[in-house]
Amino acid sequence: MNGVANKVNLLGLPRRELEEFVATIGAKPFRARQLMKWIYRRGESDFAKMTDLAKDFRAQLAEVAEVRVPEVVTLQASADGTRKWVLRMPGSSGVEQAIETVFIPELGRGTLCISSQVGCALDCAFCSTAQQGFNRNLTAAEIVGQVWLANRELGREPGDDRVITNVVFMGMGEPLANYRNVLPAMQVFLDDLGYDLSRRRVTLSTSGIVPQIYKLAEDCNVALAVSLHAPNDALRDQLVPINRRHPIAELLAACWHYLERQNGRNITFEYTMLDGVNDQPEHARELAGLLRGHEAKVNLIPFNTFPGTRFRRSPAPVIARFRDLLQQQGVIATIRKTRGDDIDAACGQLVGQVRDRMQYRLGQKLVSVSVQQ
Ligand code: SAH
């Protein structure tokens, strides 16, 4: 058992690190490239089956390395074609945990919505993941493993064209709070020997951890989505508590910097429509005032309900009016279609199974944040 635990998991190692690893066992860098093709393109996890690698290299690899993917607990299919995986994650305290991954097929594209943490520590008022609390960060292997598993499953049936064309960090967790592991995972998604996705087809969604947005601007060039949800600090402080540390003006400055530095096309601002809370015409006008003249688009998300929430979804005509008001004021706005809600796979409904070990500490942290302001 011990020997197994000590093996290096090759899943999620960016190309340079994989090259360094093969060098430690005396192999040339091109072996790393061969391995990447097997692992990601062909979805192979068994070294013995990697037939164009020398036999003794394969045997050597099996001694010291492995391709270890998360274990699937359940796979559910929605009436609209959406699929949801529940994946087992060993918990930091030895207690079993689970995370969720969702595949959303659309005409001409397939989006995989992945998780970056077991639970989430940010406590956004209208998100069911937040209610679960936070347990731990996922490793790069566990992040990339979600794509590996979905890729293998989706391409299995003959004539199955539900391939993954887009990956979005919109599952459980705050990706910028797990920067150390999210960055290498994204490098694998973008690498032409990895999943070969274009930078516009990998989207990192963040609640607005401002210093990490500046860091990301230096390190990677994926598309950025920002969970805004309110047009002023008073309201955003309530809905997205990280706003008490990084208020809207600071957040937007980081966003415009990111676009400039990465030569990006635009930033998507996510805005969950909460009945009577943030969906009034004055909110739309205030929001337009913040974004007009910038490369921004707003994605309105009808609130998805979950047990115990005090929020309700805005009525469809209210959402449509909000969109129209934004458009009239020169801001591009779309309404996100709700998918997979019959299997609790819609935005904000992912709960997995999280045994929180931080809830009390987090409560204290947030209090001290608001005192600092
Ligand atoms: N932590 C990241 C990813 C979160 S999930 C972030 O905050 O961006 C992706 C989007 O779903 C976010 O914009 C999130 O605020 C939104 N969301 C969360 N709960 C929701 C709910 N119950 N209904 C609709 N959208 C929700």
Image (cartoon, rainbow, N blue to C red):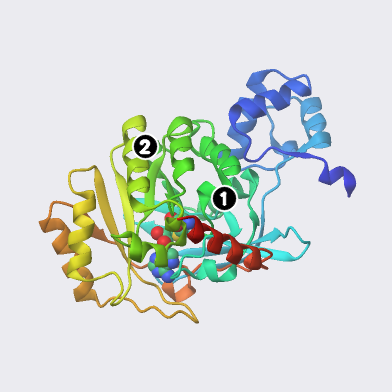
The image position of residue 135, as x and y in percent, is: 66, 61
Residue 100 is left or right of residue 251, and the answer is: right
Judge whether 281 appears above or below 201 on screen.
below
Q: Nearer the viewer, residue 372 or 279?
A: 372
Tell me residue 275's x, y (percent): 30, 77
Question: Which residue in the structure is indicated by mark 1?
Answer: 152
Q: CA distance from mark 2 to mark 1?
A: 34 Å
Residue 120 shows in the view: no
Residue 172, numbered circle: none
- Label 2: state its secondary structure: helix
Residue 58 in the image: state x and y as whole percent.
Answer: 77, 31
Mark 2: few/some/many CA within 10 Å (<14, 14-19, 20+): many
Taking the spot 63% from the left edge, 49% from the top edge, the residue there is 142
Near-viewer residue (43 or 358): 358
Q: Which residue is mark 2?
A: 258
Does residue 147 appear to the left or right of 5 in the view shown?
left
Residue 236 visible to the viewer: yes
* Residue ranking furthest to the left: 328
Q: Quadrant of ligand 1?
A: bottom left
Residue type (three-letter) at the residue carrying disc 2: Tyr
